[in-house]
Amino acid sequence: MDAASETLTIGAFGKAAGVNVETIRFYQHKGLLLTPERSYGRIRRYGSADVARVKFVKAAQRLGFSLDEVGQLLKLEDGTHCGEAAELAALRLADVRSKLADLARMETVLSTLVCQCQAQQGRVSCPLIDALHEN
Amino acid sequence: MDAASETLTIGAFGKAAGVNVETIRFYQHKGLLLTPERSYGRIRRYGSADVARVKFVKAAQRLGFSLDEVGQLLKLEDGTHCGEAAELAALRLADVRSKLADLARMETVLSTLVCQCQAQQGRVSCPLIDALHEN
DNA sequence: CTTGACTCCGTAGTTGACTACGGAAGTAAT
DNA sequence: ATTACTTCCGTAGTCAACTACGGAGTCAAG
């Protein structure tokens, strides 16, 4: 938080946060990360708050949030807007569930067809190709 | 199959197959669809085999296959290479299952957090934000 | 035979989350 | 002070599957 603790070069920052330097610059450009000043023409320095912020972003991504959504979440980072945060999470959850349903359908069809194909040894037609044809 | 049945303009073809004209051209460019000749400088004509082919592509996409994979499948379209087709499907299935596992994990975490946030009414911190902060 | 719609074709833009490149300037080590 | 590595910064490229654009040619209706 205090400037004295801003000791990391961007390379060290990236390493500490587990991302590439380019990713950091990309996040800065997207407004997810502040770009610290270059005091007296020196290179920029980063601190542990910055590392925590990137880790927050990565944690949110693992839950399926897009970077734009993460931007919204970062605005609620002080924890005093739980309702709004929960709303974002509920939207994400709905999307996750819809994708889950899609994938479950695919899984059902594919596993059935793979089974049928394995039982098909030596016969003329292919259950998978047939299924795709009868659309 | 016979040229006499190639009566559709690209617009009618698109409508019959349920895709945009641009999509047809895109598929042609990708090698998923043949581009019929322009006899005597006339416009190209398409037939029901073309429509069936596009529907095959769309059916495969609904199972999660990429267009490149669909290209492989189309080469096996005669149904005499069931083993190879099944192999492609098995790879797809593995990928679908891995994505399914990812989404299931997200679903678990998100639904838990949404619940906790709803139970949090009026208290100081936000379970969702907290969870993102603790890595 | 003109008008308006459609086709042709190549190129460029879209979305999301980066990744790569390249020249100039800052920095660390010897 | 020289060398070698970073950093800085902007622009461009990547992937997938399209979607959009624009000018020239073709076609069908009236």
Image: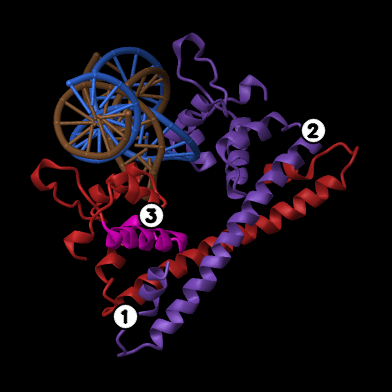
Chain colours: A red, B purple, C brown, D blue
Left or right, residue B119 beside residue B56: left
Residue that label 3 marks: A17
Please tell me whether residue A36 is drawn above or below residue B9 in the rendered image. Answer: below
- The amino acid on which the numbered mark 3 sits, given as a three-letter code, is Ala
Q: Residue furthest top?
A: B40
Q: CA distance from mark 1 to mark 3?
A: 29 Å
Please give the count of numbered marks on the rendered protein: 3
Q: Of the residues under marks 1 and 3, which one precedes in the sequence?
A: 3
Q: Which residues are magenta?
A: A47-69
Q: Secondary structure at mark 3?
A: helix
Q: Work out whether disc 3 and disc 2 sit on a shared chain.
A: no
Tell me residue A87's x, y (percent).
35, 75
Q: Is residue A69 visible?
A: no
Q: Are marks 1 and 3 in contact (CB under 8 Å)?
A: no
**In the image shown, does B104 or A124 lie closer to the viewer?**
B104
Residue that label 1 marks: A83
Which residue is depicted at the point 62% across and 32% down? Answer: B71
